[in-house]
């Protein structure tokens, strides 16, 4: 079953110390064949047992109750048990519990119908072809080799496990001097395949083989190396095997792995040694490094750039390309050139959450001189960028992550606009190679691929690609981000302009069904409370509307720029296609008008219909070359207007209006940017009132500008909720370097588990997030109640009876216990039997959370034979949930004859 839905719950690691299996015997409120729902103090614990391990995907698995996702699920070590705690009362009335995925697509018959703009996108406008093709093989022959330092060669603190150090190397033969280094990191895929796979996370057990995901990027690697770049593609299977139970889903571990490989290359390129001897000494420039990360690897390379800056910029990471990435924690990447590739038909990260890297970073730090862009590829899925994740090309099992064969709707395999695997790989090669050649090699001929002008690469073939670009600061003049209310009187005629943000609330940009169709506004897994992109929503009811922006005197001379640009998208609640006129007026009243439709299809809804989780509501670039503003004095531009004279009624989103020229920009590790970090906290729970877990949030140095980060608590798996939900902005005023985030903790006198939780920092402004996760621990300081097993006296014919099992005080733990039945004069199977049929000597029982009396059930046989009183014994030798208990405990069962 695939379920439509995005989720707003945050995700942390194991938050209650007790393991998943500790609660197996808790009584169910409702249950099915492979699932149950149990009442716990914090709400309801929902558990699903699978026949096979949960599929390994980049997205976080969800549990859906009655077809509706209710939260992110925690996986057991073998991946066959999923559990979550929810306050959703629908769980108590569950008749179905299934695995689902965020933003996943329905493949029902409803998807047969296409969207109203599908025909347009099959014949969409195409920009000019670039003279030089970055996807073509260059003049150098490429030598490939591999290095393997072992499956457990390095310990990753962010994972708590050892990882392999394994990479495939692409070397330009005959290249002279130091060359840029580009590192590729694959994403979350199965670690092992074959017989025995799944029995052990990592290293692969006997009989199975490791999945060679790192070998799947030959196309872009060959294109780069043949043009004089050094490339290494590294393996991260150990991280994939263990990141299900890590607080940040493995982002820090992936960053550390990248930096460990860079440390190897620093050694090999300076003093030599290792598997290559002196081969690379003096040949690799560690101050000119690019990182490409696919899937969860995308978050890994973004994190690596931040960690590297925090550690003084030891490596010159100057370009980062997240490819179909996750962005669970909303951590901006200032200072470094970035291009985010978004495959429109991504069936794994189907909410295209990587869009937020661009949205969050573009104006996050004043003075940031780097260029950034997003590259949306229509018809491309998540997996096919990697040949080792592509059916017919991979050595291990693989699949089309979108699926949907036969319906003919956008993104289905037989749809005319869907890219075949090799076509998609060609697009990936062109944009990956082009980006790094531009940013690391300063090969400026590739600028038009990334400036929003829709210039095409011949090797990308029929692919429809749309690029949104933020030119570097040195070649850009921002007019407005459209994220704040316009001046009074800026809108005239029958039109309105209002700031919108997010998917819910009074000022929401759109009401989404949770199908992942709002990449700008869908909530992040770890930062569900952080504000998303704010834009202006312009709506009109006739052709008289005008949105007017006046330029201050110091900004009126725009001769140095090449274009006027902004981002726009049609409101999904309005018409599928709309239009506006952009009118520019100079100081003498001379004006030039350009329809948006003449230069851009940003106001044409993207393909697909809601039944398949489409279309994606993505803002795209409107780029008006200043050469089109005939007759306007570019030395004295006074006003820019957006007029509704093209369509009688409509609504559109607007963002980021600026004058700009294409440029490479200045890119380097953001070592001088102030850095924000949050510390860990441990507190005792206390017996009454409220105590506080005070998280100290520090800024590395005083600043002259306010620094803002968003903070929220996250503990969705805790069955007892002593920790309050906190979500707020943490603001450092100029000169301040320390703030305290107070998290209330409710005291009690009941025995409970220690509770782990997180404080997550996200979406920084004027700072770099260097330690975004603060680990909180609430220590339970209440003694375990006394556990008493009493004797049972009963008579034949009573049937089901219970030994008296009691606690001296209620507990917030489910108390589970086990042991054996021991025969005396009463014989198991003849005179009595326990819970199992056929009878066996194993006994189990439990006491519900908050109860004083539990159940240890036995069934007494009515044998119709006159006989003396008989006895047997219950022996409890294991008790879960009670500390310091002396075992075993015994209780005597006495059966009186009734004949």
Image (cartoon, helix red, strand yellow):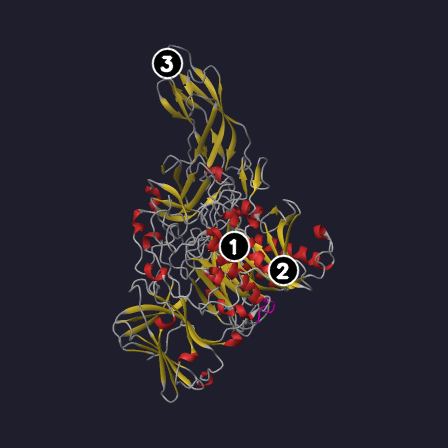
**For numbered disc 1, what is the local secondary structure?**
strand
Query: Residue 622's spot in the image, x, y percent?
Result: 40, 71
Image quarter for residue 606?
bottom left
**For numbered disc 2, what is the local secondary structure?**
loop
Q: Which residues are magenta?
A: 666-672
Q: Which residue is mark 3?
A: 863
Q: Spatial distance from mark 2 to mark 3, Cα to Cα? A: 91 Å
Query: Residue 290's spot in the image, x, y percent?
Result: 59, 61
Query: Residue 422's spot in the image, x, y percent?
Result: 48, 53
Q: Which mark is residue 140?
A: 2
Q: From the viewer's side, name the closer residue of 893 and 674.
A: 674
CB atoms at circles 1 and 2 under 8 Å apart? no
Is residue 404 in view? yes
Mark 3 nearby-residue class (10 Å; few <14, some 14–19, many ≥20): some
Q: Earlier in the sequence, mark 2 or mark 3?
A: 2
Tag count: 3
- Kindly report which numbered mark, 1 or 2, lies closer to the viewer in this rendering: 2
């Amino acid at each position: 079953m695939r379920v439509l839905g995005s989720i707003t719950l945050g995700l942390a690691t194991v938050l209650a110390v007790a393991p998943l299996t500790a609660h197996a015997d808790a009584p169910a409120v409702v249950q099915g064949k492979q699932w149950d729902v149990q009442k716990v103090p914090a709400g309801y614990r929902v558990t699903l047992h699978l026949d096979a391990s949960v599929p390994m995907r980049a997205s976080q698995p969800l549990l859906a109750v009655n077809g509706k996702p209710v939260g992110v699920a925690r996986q057991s070590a073998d991946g066959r048990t999923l559990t979550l705690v929810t306050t959703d009362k629908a769980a108590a009335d569950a008749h179905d519990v299934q695995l689902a995925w965020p933003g996943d697509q329905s493949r029902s018959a409803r998807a047969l119908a296409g969207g109203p703009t599908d025909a347009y996108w099959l014949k969409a406008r195409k920009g000019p072809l670039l003279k030089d093709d970055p996807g073509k093989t260059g003049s150098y022959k490429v030598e490939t080799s591999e290095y393997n330092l072992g499956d457990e060669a390095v310990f990753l603190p962010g994972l708590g496990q050892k990882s392999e150090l394994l990479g495939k190397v692409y070397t330009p033969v005959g290249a002279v001097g130091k060359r840029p280094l580009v590192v590729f990191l694959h994403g979350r895929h199965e670690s092992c395949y074959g017989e025995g796979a799944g029995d052990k996370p990592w290293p692969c057990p006997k009989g199975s083989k490791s999945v060679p995901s790192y070998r799947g990027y030959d196309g872009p690697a060959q294109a780069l190396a043949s043009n004089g770049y050094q490339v290494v593609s590294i393996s991260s299977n150990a991280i994939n095997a263990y990141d299900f139970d890590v607080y940040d889903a493995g982002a820090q571990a992936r960053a550390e792995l990248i930096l460990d490989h860079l440390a190897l290359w620093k050694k090999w390129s300076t003093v030599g040694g290792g598997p290559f001897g002196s081969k690379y000494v003096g040949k690799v420039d560690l101050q000119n490094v690019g990182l490409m990360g696919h899937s969860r690897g995308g978050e890994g390379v973004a994190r690596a750039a931040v960690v590297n800056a925090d550690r003084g910029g030891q490596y010159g990471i100057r370009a980062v390309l997240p490819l179909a990435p996750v962005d669970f924690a909303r951590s901006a990447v200032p200072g470094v050139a970035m291009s985010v590739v978004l495959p429109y038909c991504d069936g794994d990260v189907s909410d295209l959450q990587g869009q937020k890297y661009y949205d969050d970073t573009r104006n996050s730090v004043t003075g940031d001189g780097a260029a950034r862009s997003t590259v949306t590829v229509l018809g491309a899925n998540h997996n096919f960028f990697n040949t080792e994740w592509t059916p017919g090309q991979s050595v291990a099992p693989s699949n089309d992550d979108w699926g949907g064969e036969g319906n003919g709707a956008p993104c289905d395999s037989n749809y005319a606009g869907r890219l075949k695997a090799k076509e998609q790989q060609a697009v990936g090669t062109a944009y990956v190679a082009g980006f790094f050649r531009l940013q690391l090699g300063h090969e400026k001929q590739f600028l038009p691929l990334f400036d929003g002008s829709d210039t095409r690469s011949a090797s990308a073939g029929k692919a429809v690609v749309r690029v949104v670009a933020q030119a570097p600061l040195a070649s850009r003049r921002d007019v407005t981000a459209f994220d704040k209310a316009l001046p009074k009187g800026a809108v005239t005629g029958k039109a309105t302009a209002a700031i919108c943000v997010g998917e819910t609330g009074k000022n929401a940009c759109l009401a989404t069904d949770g199908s992942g169709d709002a990449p700008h506004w869908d909530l992040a897994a770890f930062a569900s409370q952080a504000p998303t992109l704010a834009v202006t929503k312009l709506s009109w009811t006739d052709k008289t509307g005008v949105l007017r922006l006046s330029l201050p005197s110091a900004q009126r001379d725009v001769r140095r720029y090449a274009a006027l640009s902004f981002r726009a998208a049609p409101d999904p609640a309005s018409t599928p296609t709309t239009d506006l006129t952009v009118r520019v007026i100079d100081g003498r009243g001379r004006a030039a008008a350009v329809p948006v439709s003449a230069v851009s299809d940003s106001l044409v809804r993207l393909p697909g219909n809601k039944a398949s989780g489409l279309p994606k509501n993505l803002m795209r670039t409107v780029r008006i070359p200043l050469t089109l503003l005939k007759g306007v004095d570019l030395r004295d531009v006074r006003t820019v207007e957006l007029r509704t004279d093209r369509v009688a009624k409509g609504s559109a989103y607007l963002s980021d209006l600026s004058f700009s020229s294409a440029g490479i920009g200045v890119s380097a590790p953001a070592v001088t940017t102030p850095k924000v970090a949050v510390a860990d906290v441990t507190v005792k729970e206390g017996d009454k009132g409220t105590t506080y877990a005070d998280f100290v949030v520090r800024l590395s140095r005083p600043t002259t500008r306010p620094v803002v980060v968003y903070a929220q608590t996250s503990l969705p798996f805790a069955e007892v909720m002593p920790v309050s939900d906190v979500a707020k902005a943490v603001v450092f005023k100029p000169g301040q370097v320390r703030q305290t985030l107070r998290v209330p903790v409710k005291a009690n006198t009941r025995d409970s588990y220690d509770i782990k939780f997180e404080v997550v920092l996200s979406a920084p402004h004027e700072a770099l997030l260097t330690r975004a996760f603060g680990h909180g621990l609430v220590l339970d300081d209440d003694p375990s109640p006394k556990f008493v097993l009493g004797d049972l006296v009963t008579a034949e014919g009573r049937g089901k009876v219970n030994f008296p099992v009691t606690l001296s005080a209620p507990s917030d733990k489910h108390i589970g216990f086990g042991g054996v039945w021991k025969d005396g004069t009463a014989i198991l199977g003849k005179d009595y039997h326990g819970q199992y049929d056929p009878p066996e000597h194993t006994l189990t029982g439990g006491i519900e959370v908050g109860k004083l009396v539990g159940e240890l059930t036995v069934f007494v046989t009515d044998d119709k034979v006159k006989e003396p009183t008989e006895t047997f014994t219950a022996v409890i030798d294991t008790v879960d949930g009670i500390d310091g208990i002396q075992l075993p405990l015994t209780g005597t069962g006495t059966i009186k004859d009734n004949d």
